Amino acid sequence: MTGQPITPPLQTNTLKRRGLLFILSSPSGAGKTTLSRMLLEADNHVEMSVSATTRAPRPGEQDGVHYHFVSDAEFDRMIEEDDFYEWAEVFGHRYGTPKGAIRNALKEGRDFLFDIDWQGTQQLYQKDAQDVVSVFILPPSLDELRRRLEARAQDSATVIDARMERARAEISHWAEYDYVVINDDVEECFARVCEILDAERMRRTRQTGLIPFVRELMG
């Protein structure tokens, strides 16, 4: 020890950053819901964007937690007042992402997870491209996708056929996403999704605290 005063280190761990809109899309049965749940459980800096929907609640679903359940008339009003980042109709029901307090939260560095399809993804890019990071989850094969849908035992054969037809249409949009990950093993797929999220958080353009940090660094 020389007795010289120690200059405190710069507070690199407190750099401010802008939040992001993190999209996970996939055909029904390819794993986006499972991956979304895993991400929310593992990362307390991510919160789920709660969509509004015109469909009825399923057993165990809570209004304001899983979805905002609204009437067709209320949904129409929200469209007219430009209250949605995006909205789409899926199997006869409409789903939309209310703007709410999301934009202010992004400035505070909070990240939002979106479980939406390619139509919603396109609309979100049109509204707020600078904050969007999109990931498309592919099944390892269409045979495996059908097997997963059948294993859920939630739908009739007719509904599963409809979901498979829609899956082909959704997969055709894979090249519109920033990243594409094949969900052959859910743990490996989840690890890749986390790596993408971590890297995007460190993107220079999102590090709003870098300019004052570098100024301090350079004196």
Image (tube, grey):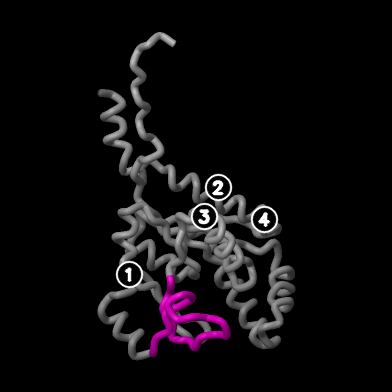
Q: What residue sits 36% from the left and 19% below the top?
A: 6
What amino acid type is highlighted by mark number 1? Lys
Alpha carbons under labels 1 and 4: distance apart? 32 Å
100 falls in the magenta region = no
- First in sequence, mark 4 or 2: give its number: 4
Element assignment for label 3: loop
**Towards the viewer: 155 or 60:** 60
Per the model, the C-alpha gap separating discs 1 and 3 is: 22 Å
Give the number of the disc on residue 195.
2
Location of residue 21 in the rendering, given as x and y in whole percent from the top left corner: 41, 59
Q: Which residue is mark 3?
A: 43
Determine whether, in the image, residue 203 is placed left or right of residue 209.
right
Callout 1 touching callout 3 (CB < 8 Å): no
Residue at which label 4 appears: 187
Is residue 62 located in the magenta-colored stretch of the structure? yes
Residue in the foreground of this view, choosing between 209 and 53: 209
- Earlier in the chain: of badge 1 and badge 3, it is 3
Q: Quadrant of the C terminus?
A: top left
**Is 65 rendered above or below residue 43?**
below
